[in-house]
Image: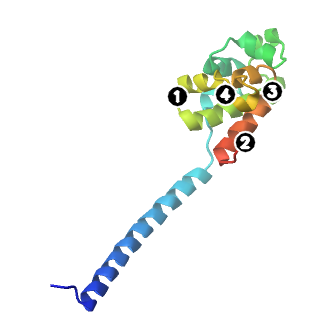
Amino acid sequence: MPTTLPDARTEILSQAADLQVQISAMQAKLQMILRGAGGLQIVLPELHDEASGRIDAQRISVYMGIPLKRLAEGLHLNYKAVHRNPSAEVFQTALKPVKRCTEILHDFFQKPETVRVWLNTPHPDLGQYSALETILANNATAVVRILENAASGVPV
């Protein structure tokens, strides 16, 4: 028996109502996500000194899987001074872009092991050098730029 016009209209209205319920649920979910994204958060707080709250070079080096001496020398910091006080205020300017790299990579990969793999993989936008080599050549800002563009969906 063919569908009559009133039956077809009822079916369309029913489907529209179902879609409206789905849209409302998705809008509510999106609002929850956006509220969470807009909230204040600290990514990788374990890379900070508990007492001062500053970035800790020793913790960064462990997270990245490299010796503290290699990190300090790569960032043109005095290794002995960094070893004595890895979260000193004077080192924060050099450590901030390195920490930012780890934050973005943590957002992408979640696991420190995967972050280390990415850091050690040659990258075409870094002249086939790895991000780690670039960071240790005191050019962490180049890596930050690539990662922030990737996070924003901006093609390089």
Calculate the distance from the C-alpha at mark 3 to the C-alpha at mark 4.
21 Å
Nearer to us in this view, 110 or 114: 114
Q: Position of residue 5 (x, y in %)?
A: 27, 90
Kind of residue at badge 4: His
For this view, does 86 lie left or right of residue 26? Answer: right
What residue sits right under mark 1 in the picture?
Answer: 111
Kind of residue at badge 1: Lys
Instruction: Please name which of the two marks, 3 or 2, marks the residue nearer to the observer.
Output: 2
What residue sits right under mark 4 in the picture?
Answer: 48
Kind of residue at badge 3: Asn
For this view, does 93 lie left or right of residue 32? Answer: right
Q: Secondary structure at mark 1?
A: loop
- Kindly identify the residue that appears in the image at 73 percent across and 20 percent down: 133
Placement of 5 over or under 87, stated as above or below: below
For this view, does 71 lie left or right of residue 16? Answer: right
Can residue 60 be seen in the rendering of this structure?
A: yes
Residues marked 1 and 2 touching at CB (< 8 Å): no
Q: Secondary structure at mark 4?
A: loop
Nearer to us in this view, 123 or 50: 123
Q: Secondary structure at mark 3?
A: loop
Calculate the distance from the C-alpha at mark 3 to the C-alpha at mark 1.
24 Å
**Dot label at residue 156:** 2
Dot 3 or dot 2: first in sequence order is: 3
Q: Position of residue 27 (x, y in %)?
A: 48, 65
Residues marked 1 and 4 touching at CB (< 8 Å): no
Kind of residue at badge 2: Val
Instruction: Please name which of the two marks, 3 or 4, marks the residue nearer to the observer.
Output: 3
What residue sits right under mark 3 in the picture?
Answer: 139
